[in-house]
Each structure stands twice: as structure tokens, then as C-alpha cells.
Amino acid sequence: MAADWEKLATALNNPTTLIAEVDCTEEVNTNICAENEVEGFPTLKYGPPSSLENYEGGRDYESLEAFAQENLKPTCSAFNLDLCEGEELVKIESYFAMSVEDLMVVVDAVDEIVAKADEEFEKGLEALQEKYMAMMEEHEKNLEAAKAKAGYKMIKNVMAFKKSQGEVASEGKEEL
């Protein structure tokens, strides 16, 4: 994927689009990676540096290029007000009218909601994992019990012996 990423950076060589990479295994990049919630590698992000979003598309060059052509262009933002219009412009102007402290209150409230949602998701995932493990354990017990009751291992052993002696399964069936 690295070669496709570098090819994309060269192909999209324009002043309004930055294609970059950050090595999150290097200590010097720890903060930027933590701030952008990079947990696995490679993680692809896009958008304004202050509010990057996860890229979920294909990892081949054609997918990356198609996404970049469609999405990596200047958009309405605090840095590009001339690209804003209608409700979007009204909304961003209302944010400009707020103090930094008021903006932080909103951001903190949303961060708290997100943290609670993540916590609930993790709890649900843990419960699901426990259920899955219990189901797998029950499934394996059932398989073992069915095979033990039928003498499955010994039957397979006898079938192998008979086959080695030249006996053929009836009705054209082969050994399982």
C-alpha cells in the first residue's frame, strides 16, 4: 500500500491537498497519533487537520485515487468561508459568534457523549464475546458427545482398515 500512497501523493500534486504519512511507532509522533485516535496500522485519515475522519475505502491505488478526486478538495470550513453557503454558512457564523470557552463547553459535552457511547459499546462487545465463548464451548461439547456416543473414532479406524484391505464402500460412497 505504501507504493500506492506515494503514487497518489505524486498524482495529486496540488497546493490545496496534502497527502502525508506519520509513523506512529516513532516516539516523536506519539502525541499526534493519540490526538487523532490512531490505534492500528495503517490508519488512513482525511479532512481538515483539526478534525480528521477515518477513511474506510479500498486500499488499492484505484480506490484511493477515486476517493481523493471526489473528496480531497477544499470545502466549507472556518478557513474557507467563501465555500460556505446557506444553512452551513449560518451555522459556521453562529460558531464564530461564540467564545472559545463556549465552544469548548460544546466540544466537551460531545466528547463526553462519545466516551459514554464507546464505553457502552465495549461493555456490549465484552458481553457478546462471553456469549460467543459459551456457545463455542457448548458446541464443542455437543460434537464430542455425539462422536463418543456413536463410537466415531473407532468407526473411522475400522473404515480405514477395511479400505486398506481392499474393501469398497457400498453405493459408491467414499470414506468421509
Image (spheres, helix red, strand yellow):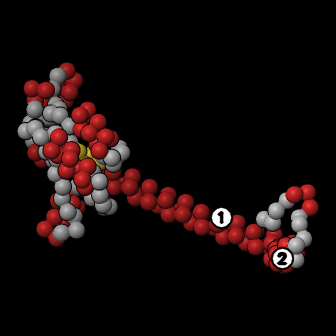
Q: Where is residue 75 in the image (x, y as percent from the top left)?
A: 17, 32
Image quarter hosting the N terminus = bottom left
Quadrant position of residue 168: bottom right
**Residue found 18% across the figure and 55% down from its top:** 21
Is residue 73 shown left or right of residue 113? left
**123 and 170: which is toward the camera:** 170
Identify the residue position indicated by label 1 in the image.
Answer: 135
The alpha-carbon separation of the residues under discs 2 and 1 comes to: 39 Å
Q: Where is residue 121 in the image (x, y as percent from the top left)?
A: 44, 55
Identify the residue position indicated by label 2 in the image.
Answer: 164
**Mark 2 residue type:** Ser
What is the count of numbered marks?
Answer: 2
**121 and 108: which is toward the camera:** 121
Is residue 93 shown left or right of residue 166? left
**47 and 167: which is toward the camera:** 167
SS at mark 1 in the image: helix
**Mark 1 residue type:** Met
**23 shown above or below 147:** above
Quadrant position of residue 174: bottom right
Q: Position of residue 32 (x, y in %)?
A: 17, 59
> In this rendering, does residue 144 appear at all?
yes
**Residue found 18% across the figure and 66% down from its top:** 30
Is residue 166 shown left or right of residue 94? right
Q: Which numbered marker is on residue 13? A: none
Q: Which of marks 2 and 1 is nearer the N terminus?
A: 1
